[in-house]
Amino acid sequence: GAGVSQSPRYKVTKRGQDVALRCDPISGHVSLYWYRQALGQGPEFLTYFNYEAQQDKSGLPNDRFSAERPEGSISTLTIQRTEQRDSAMYRCASSSTGTGGAIGETQYFGPGTRLLVL
Amino acid sequence: AQSVTQLGSHVSVSEGALVLLRCNYSSSVPPYLFWYVQYPNQGLQLLLKYTSAATLVKGINGFEAEFKKSETSFHLTKPSAHMSDAAEYFCAVTSKAAGNKLTFGGGTRVLVKP
């Protein structure tokens, strides 16, 4: 079956532009997570959803970052007025049940979107 | 708060030699621990995880890890390295209190020499 997919795989944009990054989770997966990975570092949590509800957005760095998952499936991470410091790999993951279910459940990661802000 | 430290950002091993990647965690509540592997241009793939059952966990591709609460460690080992093990490896922790959000270490890149 299909895994987690993300698009675009690469995005180059100019400082000040808005970007939208898309994540398509494994079909039927309840939970969806966004992480950001700077070069040479491990991924850092941004936000996550159970179905369409955003459960935790404590990792979003500032109010230029937002995420939505309106129908409980595909999610979009939007960065407004991009800055050079936003350049990173943005990773999406999904898992089959919400936090009311099994803790420690495996998160399945997509290939990521590499964002470069010039 | 939870955190993970991976000792050594780069490790070089000879083909056939032991692979040992170190991971120490900090968590105020019982942890759940993971090792993920990242091959070039691919997503993170789960190698193995500890979720409070057996302390010695066996994963894919011949890897295993042992949870040692007294040492707050979850080191990853493989008895005999293969060229295909060249990749970047990440240790991660979560807990019920963290709501399943993963906290990752900085990663260890493994180079396998023929």
Image (cartoon, rainbow, N blue to C red):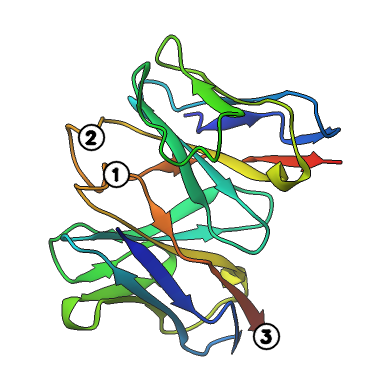
The residue lying at 74 percent from left, 28 percent from top is A81
* Label 2 crowd bin: few (<14), some (14–19), many (20+), radius 10 Å: many
B104 with respect to A16 (left or right): left
Q: Look at mark 3 in the image and give the residue it sits on.
A: B113
Residue B34 picture location, percent across and down: 35, 60
User: As rendered, which of A81 and B27 lies closer to the eye?
Assistant: A81
The residue lying at 48 percent from left, 52 percent from top is B45
Q: Look at mark 2 in the image and give the residue it sits on.
A: A99
Q: Chain of mark 3?
A: B
Question: Which disc number belongs to residue A105?
Answer: none
**Residue A9 drawn above or below residue A22:** below
Residue farthest to the top, as pictured? A71
The quarter of the picture where the N terminus of chain B appears is bottom left
Residue B77 picture location, percent across and down: 39, 79
Q: Look at mark 1 in the image and give the residue it sits on.
A: B100
B50 with respect to A80 (left or right): left
Q: Quadrant of residue B49?
A: bottom left
- C-beta proximity under 8 Å, tags 2 and 1: yes
Question: Which kind of residue does numbered mark 2 sit on?
Answer: Thr
* Label 1 crowd bin: few (<14), some (14–19), many (20+), radius 10 Å: many
